[in-house]
Image (spheres, helix red, strand yellow):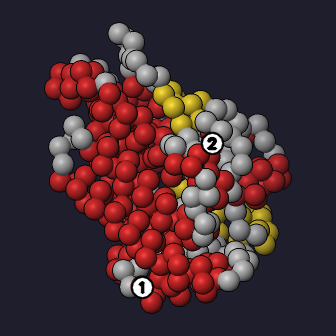
Amino acid sequence: MRTTNLSAFYHQLKSIPYVQKFLSQCYQKGNFNEYEKLSFQNADRFIYYLEHAETYLTQAKKASISIQPVLLFYGLTQLIKTCLITKRPHYPENTSLLAHGVSTRKRKKQSYRFLQDEVKIQQKGLFPYFTSHLYSIQQLPVDKFSMEHLFKKIPEMDDLYAIQHKEEQYIRIGPVDEKILRIPLKLIYDWHLSERRFVEKLQSFLPPIKEWKLDQKNLMIYLERELLPFESNLITTDIECEHLLLHKNRFLFHPFHEGMAHFLLLYNLSMICRYETEWWGELLHSFSNNDYPYILHFLNITAKKIPIMLGFFLLNQT
């Protein structure tokens, strides 16, 4: 399934009869009682969330970079809520879910650098709620994430890291439309794992595995079905949805969907451009530190990738 299919799918989601049928199938799949009634009640709300998301994202592409993070963050938030309706027909169940679910340091220090800044995950709010219900992640290994760590969760940022450090961080492990993954044996041995142990660690992030075997350079994993774009909480894909990608760093080998990284980065950037206006203005006009290329490159990527990632989530629900 390529990104060109998503445009037609988004257009179809502007029809009340289609959305009612779509939501009915989602709620049947989720074993909700009165799924027809719930789909009727939620169809308008679904379309309004989606329309609001599209408006924010469209305006972000036209806007100055000085306000782009705010528009992109709210566009992503509305699209997340659109997806949540397919899983949680009664969302929001309580007012605590209206909070963002993350926080950041309120005042930046004199020597502040964005790459070293952190966001902290809260126990309640939108972030822990959607990570649980959209990506089935109940608990994270830590409650704080640096911006640099989050950038490394986005494969298109690899272009900048390759320029800076002369080394790519992601490896291609197969085309999106095949049932075979090819993991270089060198990566497995660099992680000090046996082939069997690596498969055991990886299998919870994949569709059912039929078999695995070795060739001279690769571990070949044969799947029962294709791994869908952005289905995995470990393996991601590029904007064109052509290649499945795995990060080389073993310390990033934990459940964490790429969509979560986009949310946390945009949350922090939107807070900075609203409440740390002096630092934000100096960043945009002085080019005085290495934060600017990373932020600029990320904003360009996330504007394109948000509707693709969450569009595939919706497409894969029925």
Residue 238 x, y percent position in the rendering: 44, 57
Taking the image as drawn, is residue 245 in sight? no
What's the amino acid at mark 1? Ile
Mark 2 residue crowding within 10 angstroms, few (<14) / some (14–19) / many (20+)? some
Query: Residue 124 got which mark?
Result: 2
Element carrying mark 2: loop
The quadrant in which the C terminus is found is bottom right
Per the image, the residue denoted by label 1 is 16
In this rendering, would 120 be left or right of 35?
A: left
In this rendering, would 198 be left or right of 126?
A: right
265 vs 179: above or below = above
Q: Residue at x 47, y 22 (%)?
A: 105
Q: Residue at x 35, y 38 (%)?
A: 270
Marks 1/2: CA distance?
Answer: 32 Å
Q: Residue at x 47, y 78 (%)?
A: 43
Q: In front here: 312 or 132?
A: 132
Query: Residue 100 got which mark?
Result: none
Q: In front here: 91 or 200?
A: 91
Taking the image as drawn, is residue 86 in sight? yes
Residue 121 x, y percent position in the rendering: 59, 35
Residue 40 x, y percent position in the rendering: 53, 83
Q: In front here: 170 or 274?
A: 274
Q: Residue at x 67, y 48 (%)?
A: 255
Q: Give the mark, 1 or 2, whose residue is nearer the N terminus.
A: 1
111 vs 198: above or below = above
Element carrying mark 1: helix
Occupied quadrant, residue 245: bottom right
